[in-house]
Image: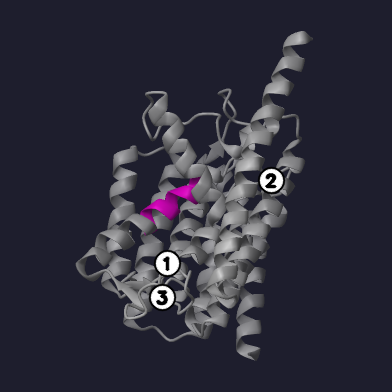
């Protein structure tokens, strides 16, 4: 326990101390986010590469606490590839297909090291008691690949306001930490704790008004690690609805990404084409300030995280009621947000 606490402090301290140095490095390399189009919310040029400080804090704590083994080598190799990809993309944007290829390779490396969704608890176990688990067999490989690459990009897509992706990632990591602890997965719990700590060390520099952005270096790394931790930590848990735990824990980015895909497809746009239809844009359009929008999304993410933790402990009937309640509230929230956005637009038109 003492060593885990020390590792948490190391991750937080290294990240916090490294961020000012990364700011200087970003300025030296010209990795600056200039608000030259209407999609960006910030008003002044801001350094990127902040994810490098998060990665350094995470790496320092991990190497302090754990001896290197094949699974860790695979996870770290994939993480290093993701961070390197983000680093160069933050300096000069890389082609989307190349970025996707590197993400796939990093995911495959993690999968080959043992990070696989090979089974989950059967949520319909009460109907088919002889089938306690759903075994995926060879389907575990493409399923895990889709999960890792999908979550990696989901965090990147939600990174649109000062402190938003960092705060949501902290909440998701804490949720996965608690869930992994409750299901007896100490390695996953440790990874989640130092990921939360290293991101927390970076957040003071990233919260509005941000002195630095995490960039793709940070967003892709956080998405990659959250996906890996969820696979080795809670997806294989014995809880009847364990499959929903990581979906709730990382619920906000997943929800935003899925709706972005539907929105772009319905509008005949490319899936990789940026737009201003994300949740944070809608909150801004509804009249919220940046800070108000970020705190609102923090709160939603925290509620989803709490629900994910509770799902591990409650009976199946209670779990189904909770899932129904969450989806009902999400539908009501989406309707309210759309109406508020329309009302705000009408008020502006009247002026």
| Disc marking residue 236 | 3
Task: Look at the image and say whether residue 225 sits in the magenta stretch.
Answer: no
| Disc marking residue 293 | none
**Mark 3 / mark 2, whichever is N-terminal:** 2
The residue at 61%/88% (across/down) is 3
Q: Which residues are magenta?
A: 148-156
Could you tell whether 286 is left or right of 304 in the image?
A: right
Q: Nearer the viewer, mark 2 or mark 1?
A: 1
Find disc 2 in the rendering and name its residue: 211
- Mark 2 element type: loop
Nearer the observer, 52 or 157: 157
Nearer the observer, 124 or 244: 124
Find disc 1 in the rendering and name its residue: 228
User: Which quadrant: the C terminus?
Assistant: top right
**Mark 2 / mark 1, whichever is N-terminal:** 2
| Number of residues whose C-alpha sits closer than 10 Å to that of mark 1, classed few (under 14), some (14–19) or many (20 or more) | many
Tell me which secondary structure the magenta stretch mostly adopts.
Answer: helix
Task: Look at the image and say whether residue 153 sits in the magenta stretch.
Answer: yes
Find residue 98 and report its horizontal and vertical position in percent.
29, 43
Find residue 25 and report its horizontal and vertical position in percent.
56, 50
Q: Tell me if residue 146 comes above or below residue 263 in the rendering.
A: below
The residue at 29%/68% (across/down) is 111
- Mark 1 element type: helix
Residue 288 visible (yes or no): yes
């Amino acid at each position: 326990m003492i060593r885990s606490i020390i590792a948490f402090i190391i991750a937080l301290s290294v990240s916090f101390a490294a961020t000012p140095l990364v700011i200087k490095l970003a300025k030296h390399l010209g990795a600056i986010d200039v608000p030259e189009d209407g999609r960006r919310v910030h008003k002044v040029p801001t350094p990127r590469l902040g994810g490098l400080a998060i990665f350094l804090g995470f790496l320092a704590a991990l190497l302090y606490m754990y001896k290197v083994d094949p699974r860790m080598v695979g996870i770290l190799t994939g993480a290093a590839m993701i961070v390197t990809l983000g680093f160069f993309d933050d300096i000069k944007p890389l082609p989307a297909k190349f970025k996707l290829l590197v993400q796939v390779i990093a995911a495959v490396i993690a999968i080959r090291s043992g990070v696989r969704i090979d089974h989950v608890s059967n949520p319909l176990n009460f109907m088919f008691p002889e089938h306690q688990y759903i075994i995926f067999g060879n389907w575990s490989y493409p399923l895990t690949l889709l999960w890792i690459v999908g979550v990696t990009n989901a965090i990147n897509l939600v990174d649109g306001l000062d402190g938003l992706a960092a705060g949501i990632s902290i909440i998701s990591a804490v949720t996965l930490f608690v869930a992994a602890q409750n299901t007896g997965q100490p390695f996953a719990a440790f990874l989640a704790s130092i990921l939360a700590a290293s991101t927390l060390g970076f957040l003071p520099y990233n919260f509005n008004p941000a002195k630095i952005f995490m960039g793709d270096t940070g967003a892709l790394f956080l998405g990659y690690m959250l996906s890996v931790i969820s696979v080795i930590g809670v997806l294989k848990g014995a809880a009847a609805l364990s499959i929903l735990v990581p979906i709730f824990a990382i619920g906000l980015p997943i929800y935003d990404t899925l709706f972005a895909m539907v929105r772009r497809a319905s509008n005949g746009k490319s899936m990789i084409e940026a737009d201003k239809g994300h949740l944070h844009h809608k909150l801004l359009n509804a009249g919220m300030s940046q800070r108000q929008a970020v705190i609102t999304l923090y709160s939603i993410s925290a509620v989803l995280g709490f629900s994910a933790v509770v799902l591990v402990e409650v009976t199946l009937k209670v779990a189904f009621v909770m899932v129904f309640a969450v989806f009902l509230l999400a539908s009501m929230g989406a309707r309210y947000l759309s109406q508020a956005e329309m009302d705000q637009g009408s008020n502006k038109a009247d002026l």
